[in-house]
Amino acid sequence: MKKSTIAWIALMAVTAQPLGASALADPVSDSLEIDGQAMITEAPAPKEPAGHPFEVVKSGWLYREPETRSMEMDSFENPGMLNVERGEEIWNTVEGEAGKSCASCHNEASESMKGVGAHYPKWNANAGKPINIELQINACRENQMKAEPYKFDAQDQKDLSAYIKHQSLGMPVEVDLSAGDMMSWWEKGKERYYLRTGQLNLACATCHEANNGLYLRADHLSQGNTNGFPTYRLKQGNLVSLHNRFRGCIRDTRAEQPKAFSDELMALEVYTAWRGGGLSVETPAVRQ
Amino acid sequence: MATPKPRVKVPKKASAGETITIKTLISHDMESGQRKDKDGNVIPREIINKFTCEFNGTKVFECDLEPAVAANPYFEFSAKVPESGTFKFTWVDDNGSVYTEEQKITVE
């Protein structure tokens, strides 16, 4: 009897091993350099406003496979850079009745757009709400260029916003919550982040806060920081915008998806950008 | 699909007999022929099916690609350079198009 108990415990120890080997699932400790430029992939969590759940915020890069990580380290190997190059062409292309391109007003993006992407979403007094890069581009197209605004996730929209955000590569994400009514949007975003929805009854926090570092089936859950968007996802073989990813996650909880750029998702963008504050802009990041 | 755009990265200089690393990337959908459109019709296969690299007319590297290869195929390989010359890269598309790119290297 005693013998079999010991054997049973031994068997338990063996079978328990895969579960116990959670170190495999933890984010790696590694430093990211893109073409020799150091990126901040771990930063102390923002202190203001209080209530950040983590001590340290971590880039999703630390949660990916070695092959995926190395793709991002070399801007030549990063397929997202093809879109960034295309974005540069769009930047210089005249469109609309006003006969203007982005460059007509903003000249060289490498100078005028440096740091811009790191500070979005931003309070917009005219709209009376925060806007992101995609909406700013559309505002420029309508008001300055007299061109059609991009439809959500048009390839040009993704390529151009990636090009603009790429000009801030390496700079820390910092959202200005003191402007306008940003704090109430932050509050709304926080509420949405912790709200369980869908048939699976999941909140953003269920995966990205409580279980980050663990596997959800084959998916290695990260903290869900937004510093790499638009990000090149190997699954899609294309750039994926933040609002597309928000909608994708919400779809996966089997909930009804809010519209892209809706108030609900803009509030979530404000909140998640704050959560990942201090991390380098990695656009276009390479993810699974 | 936008016109595929090849990119290559070859060092500008090397010493004689040195082994250098060459990187190439081409933007391409690599449509596998397995997918269906919204109406249920098969989207015909259209991939890059062959890649070659020549140095001064001599073949250095050759590779056949299959439908399972992901979009935007990337190659990294090594080559020994005996003398100054030109690397010529060729990608062959299912639709008959051929995309080429050349890069010079100086051996000192």
Image (cartoon, helix red, strand yellow):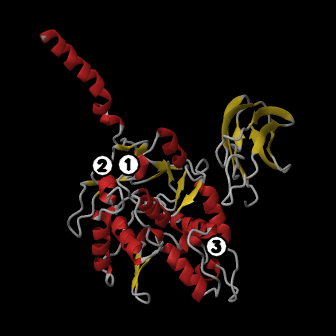
Residue for badge 3: A91
Under circle 3, the secondary element is: helix
Q: Nearer the viewer, mark 1 or mark 3?
A: 1
In the rendered image, the vertical position of residue B58 relative to residue A211, given as above or below: above
Q: Residue at 72% x, 55% y: name it.
A: B41
Q: Residue at 31% x, 76% y: name it.
A: A177
Of residue A28 and residue B31, the one placed in the foreground of this image is: B31
Residue B96 in picture, x, y percent from top left? 86, 49
Amino acid carrying label 2: it is: Asn
Amino acid carrying label 3: it is: Trp
**Label 1 vs label 3: CA separation?**
35 Å
Of residue A24 and residue B81, the one placed in the foreground of this image is: A24
- Are discs 1 and 3 both within one chain? yes
Residue A244 in picture, x, y percent from top left? 50, 64
Residue for badge 1: A221
Which quadrant of the structure image shows residue A181?
A: bottom left
In the rendered image, the vertical position of residue B78 relative to residue A51, given as above or below: above
Residue for badge 2: A211
Chain at tag 2: A
Give yes or no for contact between labels 2 and 1 (Cβ–Cβ under 8 Å): yes
Amino acid carrying label 1: it is: Leu
Q: Residue at 20% x, 67% y: name it.
A: A50
Which quadrant of the structure image shows residue A52?
A: bottom left
Under circle 2, the secondary element is: loop
Q: Earlier in the sequence, mark 2 or mark 3?
A: 3
Under circle 1, the secondary element is: loop
